[in-house]
Image: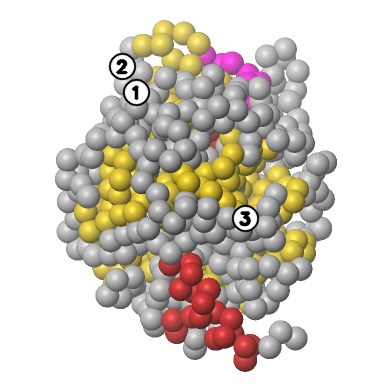
Amino acid sequence: MKLRSYRVALLLPLVFACHISTTLWAADLRDGVVLGHAVGDLPSSSGVNRVQASDVGWPQLVEETYVGPVFHDLDNDGTLDVIVVAGNSLYVFDHTGAIRDGWPQTSGRSSLPAAVGDLDGDGSPDIAVTGALGGAHLRVFSSGGTMLSGFPVGLPYLNSLTCSSPVFADLNGDKSLEVGAASDLGISFFHADGRPVEGWPYTWINTEGWLTPQWCAPAVGDLDGDGKLEVVVGNKAYPQSGVHVVQANGSPMPGWPKYTDPVWASPALADLDDDGDLEIILKTGEWYYFGHLLYVWHHTGEDLTGWPRAICEDGDSSRGSPAIADIDGDGSLDIVTDTSDGFLHVFDNTGNYLPGWPKGVAEHLMASPVVIDIDGDWAQEIFATYWTANSQYIGGWHSDGSEVRGFPQVLISGTNWKAHAQPHVADMEGDGDLELTVTSFQDYEGWVHIIPIPDSTYDPAMSATHWQKFRRDAHATGVFPGNWASGISGDQTPRPRITLSVWPNPFNPRTTISFFNREPGHVELAVYDLAGRRVAHLVGDWLESGNHEETWNGCDMTDRSVATGQYFVRLKTRDGIDVQKVILAK
């Protein structure tokens, strides 16, 4: 048994240390070259050297931050804006590095990234952020920086150091979003006017007060396939630390909660066993428990065969959240996660390591990994930050564990500050080239960087196969793929001009794909597998406006039947892109 009587002595220096931890400095290092400024161009102190690499107009100075930024197209101009939580402020920059009108706004001292969704249904995205200054609370701003009426709202708390990232979800199935977040006493959801959703908050017992910061963000998805959403969240509040699964009406799902070691890392949801239901992937572990476990549960609370896995015998609190993707291209989903002893792990869905894994990376690894194909070769690359006694790094690895050329790279040298934040990778300018957004923190100043990745290629249809940022999608649902989670896709702001539906789903042997084309123009409709390969091309022609239907018979482009499993239907019109998941049943 692990003795709880030693907690305070162990926790005091570490809790205060986490407040001054830093995120990351990054460079594009794909060709082994640091772009932009040389080491030391930015102000430095105490012998700290900074590696800075940024696109034109970057980096930008903000308040202290150890929170990863978020990309999103807030004004629907085809380029991505950068949303940054820093100090007591929420910043929004356009792609050139200019601060957008109406920003920054007061955030209330946030410690985790923002989420984006159209909460009030006006067709424009809103930004949600939590804070703990003066008590736990949730704020929601319009894209122009105006606080939505009814906000901020309070969250139940005992003495919260940290509140989770928010999440957007359509809990009641009315095609409008609600917004929620977790604190040290429970999780709450609110309507667009700030009213609590009926049945919420869901609370737990906490007898440890300020020792229980709520780093774990909720995940939202239809776990059991009944058309209703469930909310999954972990906590570290003794005596009810563990994972809670809550139904849309605010009541616990049968078989839950499960009490485990304390949970810092946020859960992920994915259909790992290809049965049409989502599984829960969650990592536990804290310094005074000296070990990390990686769990995979069915929605019933039963362990998936091969799980849990012990992945660290002795380490610090484990804050990096798992990323889900088909890493090796075999058609099945894999799990990528870190442990604070400096190892990066990649498992298949049965709990076995993929060849080349695990990898000992450094002394400390506590940041969530991201997964994306940067060069269009259908193989997924993994990127994560880590640190040693005197430097911070960003590393990159291929699916077999070999290092991406030019990695690792030093981000900051001469400091032992921790690198906790996850980067976000996206096509910022809509030109097919990928950019990486990262933040760094030193001496109570933060910097935001945009780093171009030369010679990169990107197809938005492939976003369904990636895990490109913290919580995966803009709604911060933590679900693979993202459009399972909220009832309204979190990968893009909902666009009323695009309607794509697939019925029946699951299907066998054929399904009907219906969509509305608002105005005449070229339309592409295709089906992709989990590895991002196009298996069927259904439409590639000029179509008149109006309603259209196409049938997919479960065959590829050579008229051979494809294997049962998950696929993605991708529609591209003049109004944008929509992607829906479809399952070919056995």
List the residue tagged with mark 2: 519
Can you identify the residue that label 1 sits on? Answer: 575
Mark earlier in primary sequence (1, 2):
2
Q: Amino acid at mark 1?
A: Asp
Marks 2 and 3, how far apart at CA: 56 Å
The numbered mark at residue 388 is 3
Residue 198 visible: no
Magenta part of the chain: 531-539
Q: Nearer the viewer, residue 62 or 197?
A: 62
> Nearer the N terminus, badge 2 or badge 3?
3
In front of the other: 289 or 21 = 21
| Quarter that holds the N terminus | bottom right
Q: Residues within 10 Å of mark 1 (few under 14, many from 20)?
A: some
Check disc 2 and report its element: helix, strand or loop: loop
Closer to the N terminus: mark 1 or mark 3? Answer: 3
Report the amino acid beneath label 3. Thr
Q: Which numbered disc covers residue 500?
A: none
449 in relation to 364, above or below: above
Q: Answer whether labels 1 and 2 touch (C-beta < 8 Å).
A: yes
Q: Secondary structure at mark 3?
A: loop
